[in-house]
Amino acid sequence: MFTEIFYEQNDVINQSWKRCQEIGLSQTDPIENSILTGKALRQLIKENELLIKHATTVINSLPSSYCSKLVVVIVDRNGTIIHKVGQLDASGSTDYLSIGSNWSEENKGTNAMGLAISAKVPIITHADHHFYVKNQFLTCAASPIYSPDGELIGAVNISARKELFHPFIISLTNIMATSIQNGLLFDQASHEKVITIKELEAITSFSTVPLLSLDDDKRIIRANQSARQLLGEDCIGKEFHHTSGYKTKVISDSFQKQSRLVMAFHKAPKQTTKDKKLYTITDIIGSCPKMNEVRKKVKKAALTDFPIIIYGESGTGKELIAQSLHTSGLREDQPFIAVNCSAIPETLIESELFGYEKGAFTGANREGVVGKFEAANDGTIFLDEIGDMPLKAQAVLLRVLQEKAVTRVGGVKPIPINTRVIAATHKNLRKEIEAGRFREDLYYRLKGIVMTIPPLRERSDLIELSNYLIKKLDSPSLHLSSEAKEKLLSYHWPGNVRELNSILMQASFLVEGNEILAKDLDFETEYERTESYSEDEATLTSLVHSEKEVIKRTLDYVSWNISRAASILKISRNTLYLKIKNIIYSNKKTKTSLS
């Protein structure tokens, strides 16, 4: 009887047995029983949560009496059990079919779920059809499960003791697999509907301009008549790479499971003389590989609305990058508001960022004031030196980012905001968190995409950048001598690009002729090297002079921010003030200046 029932499947089973023997498995050997656990298992279950969700719905619809002596399991595409309902009615059999165990043919020999995945067919393995003797007390049936796109994603398997065999079992697994597939298909259709509605909402204001919709592979899936005239009638299905001149919007469903890129052709608005010109991606100059990587990230990140943290030393160009992200993105026609978090007194930072109502405090503007976040609504707010923001202000900022609304100081009504946040700092925020100076929850709110701008001393394009800055000084005929280039390359650049620009500006002023010589490059530290001390004085004051130079360089580096300088020097603010006072007193005696 069994021979007739399994006649059509015998070939599949025989081939499986042959493969098992070829890879060296023996019927009486111990069965490989390594089980996935812990973080790896949780990650696998998370990756297959939709499959498990729909499988659970189908399994729960089975009569409880029918399932009492069966085990129903779901395996992923690799044969690992990710969901299980029921238990075998056999003493000593509880180790079978554990969640996390792998039932691929390579691990468990010939078995139904392993064959359903490898052969991609519904299959029954009854009793001695199983390769391993220890599995021959089972009767099992399994059917493959496919995604809405036709990709194999797993299988459903029913197992019982061989005495409970019934040929209907394979029909049941087929029905269950079909039901799971239908649930996944319905889910995709629901998400697609949400995406389509959002897509229509996004394009209503661009009905007369060339308009495209792209899938995740950047292929055109929709194009209006204007776009087809521009790109050709056969553009549907082709990849689209030209984003210049197109305004883009990324839309996704509420579960972030599907997304689509909508692109509308537009002309950039004319710049008026009253408008402040912002940097664009073309202002990111240099061929250094590190800067090429930054430029690549800016191009990609500009088309998203993710929050961004920019790391970089003072003078490396953090605001250049922030403005380029804004002008290359979806909000380029909206406000760009920059805030220096280290320059606002702690007592005023809330009113500066969130505004205040009239009469909120003594001396307040009679009409109240709009805060920076309100001013940046629909645009971008750039929080420079976010690492210097006081903890109290960090707590309020966190609430604003969570609720996407601000409440003015002295007000009670939340004001909704839609603002992209770009933060920048010269500090290591992870170390600031460990030191208790920065909130970890705020850090993760700000940390969507991270960019690091290399310091000038680590860039390989310093001379190229210098030539560009010289041309920007309206001195196109000026050029650097070989000695000047060597001098630039040998300097350590604590002030980075900002310092380089300042030195080249002075050089263009001092130069006689069209060639900038080494002597025209006036590094500030040289003043201190050429002070007219006597030999004895220089010997006696060398230690004091070294300390003065370190303090001077540090103060210049942080633009005379005493708190930051004290932190870098690892001394208290009071100690630093005292040292500055002593240096000034000493300088008066020697007729020199701290600056």
Image (tube, rainbow, N blue to C red):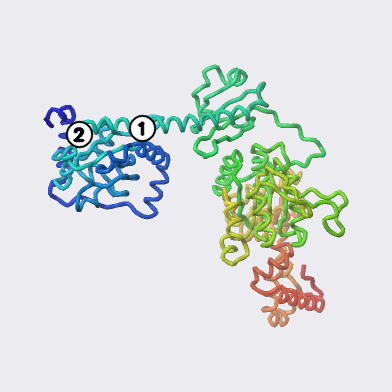
Q: Indicate the secondary structure of the residue bearing disc 2.
A: loop
**Which of the two residues, 33 or 520, is positioned nearer the viewer here?**
33
Can you say whether 519 is above or below 592 in the image? above
Disc 1 crowd rating (10 Å Cα; few below 14, some 14-19, many 20+) is many
> Element under label 1?
strand
**Quadrant that contains the C terminus:** bottom right
Q: Quadrant of residue 397?
A: bottom right
Amino acid type, callout 1: Tyr
Query: Residue 235 in the image: x percent, y percent?
Result: 53, 21
Q: Is residue 27 above or below residue 506?
A: above
293 or 28: nearer the viewer? 28
Residue at the spot x=68%, y=78% of the render?
Answer: 542
Instruction: Locate residue 273 relative to residue 454 in the image: left or right.
Output: right
Question: Up-down: is 480 above or below 431?
Answer: above
How far from the left and from the top, in percent, is residue 99? 32, 49
Q: Earlier in the sequence, mark 2 or mark 1?
A: 1
Of residues 192 and 373, which is closer to you in this image?
192
Horizontal side of residue 357 vs 483, given as left or right: right
Residue 146 - label? 1
- Comparing 517 with 155, the one in front is 155
Choose mark 2 or mark 1, whichever is in front.
2
Q: How many marks?
A: 2
The residue identified by callout 2 is 166
